[in-house]
Amino acid sequence: MIRTGEQYRESIRDGREVYIDGERVEDVTRHPMLKPLVDIRARIYDMAHDPATRETMTYQDEGGERHAIALKLPHSQDDWHDKRRATDAVLDDVGGIVTRVGDETIGEMWSLYDGQDVLNEVDPRFSSNIRRHIQRAIELDPFHVSANTDPKGDRSKRPQDQDPDMLLRVVKETDAGIVVRGAKYETAAAYANQAFTKPTIANWGEAEYSDYAVGFVCDLGSPNLKMICRTGFAGRGSIEDYPLSNRFDEVDALVIFDDVLIPWENVLFYRHTRAAQFIRATLHRYSAFAFVQRNLKLADAMIGTALHNVRQTGLDGQQAVQEKLARLACYREGVNAHLSASIALAEPSPGGLLMPNQSLLYTGRVLACSQLHEMIHITRELCGGQICVTPNAADFANPATAPWLDKFYSVNENWVADDRRRLLAYARDLLNSDYAGHRLTFQLFAQSPPFAHLQAVYRNFDFDGPLDFVRRAAGLSARVKGQ
């Protein structure tokens, strides 16, 4: 059954070994850099019980039990519309953008659901494990994330030719399960319940990689698991001056597997390079939808920030300003169109699910990520240089400086100094802060690097139509189709 926020908090008070800023974290639910996201995830759980949002966040199964919409296997277009509404409801409720909160990462498990024939080549129990874990997620509602990226080391060498732990690998097989060693980077691992841990991008055609061809579900409270977090942005400045950094920073961690035992019931594939190749090729078949949807909300944040700014200074009537706003709107609607069309033209998956149209979804991801930096720059232009020179809130409250700031930051009776300061602080944190730079890089790489985004388009675009059109238009013989 769906947990409450407090039940979630209690579930991660399990003695896990987490470090941040050189110190061990005693309670991840209370650490000032982790607490903001723990509270948001707790709020998502509570939204499932809140009468105002319950119907949007949950569905009722045949037995009358309520489950999270985000974790439901997608079988219809309505399922996808429901998921989209639930994600929007969360982002609207918390007033910002959070990505690794479960609705995106659970989709990676569905790709393995589609690959059960591949898993059966290794061992039928692995196929049974994936079905059981997906059902377990629906019934027990854990905070589920993924662990994908390894430290990798020298990429010109195979892992066997350097420190072999640079890619996560199996070091021992026991009656109880497999023992793994290595490390993974994962956003939100420090305050999540479990992670789908899978191979990174590699040349899976080489049999020597078999020790690294492993996928499993890891309990993030497991013995011998250590998490070393990057320093968070929360608390570096006041929330008045950095309203996004202090509320929405999703802290990433290097998750170290120091000979961690993975029980057999949690192993999804093992020493099978074809399974590793399959999961890498189809990993984001479903999860890319929720990921790209965040860019839509980010576009709304940029448009709202830019338009408020030009209106309060009276520049919204200028053609050059309107053209820049229109470019932001085109970006926003381009992302929206790809998401909507991927549902409208959704396709049956190999496992009997309904997956978003793959070509349109992956093309939308390239659009959303590759143009994001340009949209941020346009928003900066429309906000102007005051986002990098405006004093902090304390100066607006100081009796010695407040009168001057009230004078120079009040535009008219509608835009007084306090509102203008708040808008500029929001814009600074959205566009110029350490958090803003981190967020841009996260969007570029969180679902694989840009070249892999384009490879996904290449694998899923239907080239037969253009080829056949040119063959007929140019009068080419049917022999060329043999190529």
Image: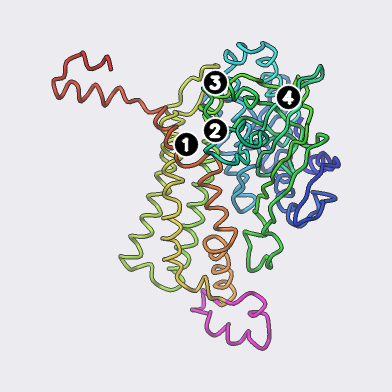
Q: Is residue 173 above or below residue 343?
A: above
Q: Is residue 115 left or right of residue 454?
A: right
Between 217 and 96, the one nearer to me in the picture: 217
Which residue carries the number 4 mark?
Answer: 136
**SS for callout 1:** helix
Judge left or right: residue 307 versus residue 186.
left
Asked whether residue 453 appears in the rendered view, the answer is yes
Identify which amino acid the numbered label 3 is placed on: Leu
Residue that carries the numbered disc 1 in the rendered image:
452
**Which residue corresponds to the image point at 55% horizontal and 60% vertical from the top-left?**
430
Q: Which residue is mark 2?
A: 201
Tell me where the magenta segment starts and ends, as one range.
391-416
Q: Secondary structure at mark 3?
A: loop
Q: Amino acid at mark 2?
A: Ile
- Magenta stretch: residue 397 in it? yes
Work out whether 360 lies above or below 185.
above
Q: Where, quadrant-wise, is the N terminus in this rendering?
A: top right
Kindly report the distance in space between the C-alpha atoms of the residues bearing marks 1 and 3: 24 Å
Q: Earlier in the sequence, mark 4 or mark 2?
A: 4
Q: Position of residue 245 (x, y in %)?
A: 64, 59
Q: Residues within 10 Å of mark 3 (few under 14, many from 20)?
A: some
Q: What residue would you read off at disc 3?
A: 353
